[in-house]
Amino acid sequence: MNATVDKVITETINGLDAELRQISIKIHDNPELGEHEFNASHLLCNYLEGKGFRVTRGAAGMPTAFIAEYANSTKGRRMGYCSEFDALPGVGHACGHNLIAISGLACAIATKALLEHGLIEGSVVLYGTPAEESTSGKITFVQKGEVQSRVDVAMMLHPGPANGVFVKMLALDALKVEFFGKASHAGMKPWDGINALDAFMQGWNNVSMLRQQTLTTNRVHGIITDGGKSANVIPDYAAGRFYCRAVTRAQLREFKEKVENCFKAAAGATQCQLKLTWAPYGAIDDVFQNSELGYSYIDYMKQEGAQFFPRSVEETVVSGSTDMGNFSYVVPTLHPGFEIGTTAANHTVEFTKAARTPEAHQYTLRAARSLSRTAASVFLDDSFYERVRAEFLQGKPQ
């Protein structure tokens, strides 16, 4: 790494310490659910405008989304980062999206500083991506062409209990299941009814038995959202929601068909009508992690004292899902996890508390410095960028 480039990145991000800490705390202490992150979006947009970015609010037709841009040339490479800022129901920022928000700010501002100093040529884009935990705003960015038309590479950071790059992130689709039957008096004439809840439970049991006959890396889990209104009435309507996950989007397509058949069989057996509705915003893709970017990030993190498990160990871990996977199928992408000084798992109250600590903040800045150095390598090292691009064009092994 060029000493001057490294110095600009380090001094820029370290100089943002207090400002980013304040933003992180404001977002953490005022959690907002997906598509309703109005305060967080407003806070981030105002800050970026104050730092000299051109900000488009309500980007891609999403009220809380934004795109912040800065360029010193129409030539050169185009680097994209992401900030997330939505919370989870009941547990707030249990996935540390307050830290993801400020890590995106740090990386974008550091890259902008390199552009301003004339050390690199091109542009930087920060995507404000709403509703990662629910309706997956990054999917809309991809569907609207806002990613592939604006950036050559996309990267972001995600907090967790450990550092990692090559953990498997699963493809996911969400399913709404509805059974329609016929109501009847449950004590007087149950034979006149068609029990929608019985149909739903048959489908549920079919799904449970499917688990034995599918890949161990596949996931299906759900809840009942409507099981009837009175124990004395045969339910004429029952509904639930399910998530289906698989290691690749190709495996997910196959798995979804099998899950659908579980409910179709139950409908046929009970004479109920069935309605299956997959997520209207589209499926979340698995993350096609670019290993060239990943190894570069690991090297820079290790220079700052971070520790990683070997890739062979990381790849045995099957984790959650993220809509960053959809970015990864249109541009070379990196989505590493970074430790924040806790053993607590994401999506727990304990992780919510950890995401607010000064220790977590400093770990975030360390990861942001490392990711910014990887970004600088994309701009400065033609051979490195060609390897990044070649791996992407070759496609993900299935």
Image: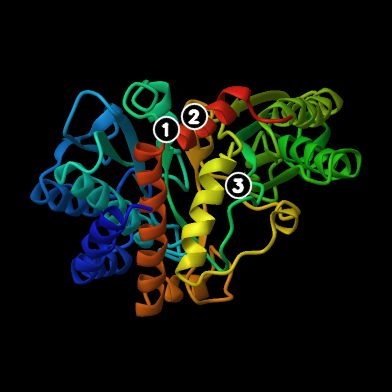
Amino acid found under the numbered disc labelled 2: Glu
Q: Which residue is mark 1?
A: 382
Which of these two is toward me, 251 or 150?
A: 150
Find numbered disc 2 in the image and state the secondary structure of the residue it sits on.
helix
Q: Which residue is mark 3?
A: 229
Name the N-terminal-most of marks 3 and 1.
3
- Residue drawn at x 22%, y 51% is 109
Q: Which residue is mark 2?
A: 386
Label pair 3/1, CB-CB below 8 angstroms: no
Amino acid found under the numbered disc labelled 3: Lys
Identify the residue at the far front of this view: 3
Label pair 1/2, CB-CB below 8 angstroms: yes
**Residue 213 visible (yes or no):** yes
Distance between mark 3 and mark 1 Cα atoms: 65 Å
Amino acid found under the numbered disc labelled 1: Asp
Residue 292 in the image: x percent, y percent?
55, 41
| Dot label at residue 147 | none
Count neighbours of disc 2 (C-alpha within 10 A) and say few if under 14, some if 14 to 19, many if 20 or more: few
Count neighbours of disc 3 (C-alpha within 10 A) and say few if under 14, some if 14 to 19, many if 20 or more: few
Above or below: residue 187 compared with residue 92: above
- Residue drawn at x 78%, y 35% is 199
Residue 7 in the image: x percent, y percent?
26, 61
Residue 192 in the image: x percent, y percent?
78, 29
**Residue 129 visible (yes or no):** no
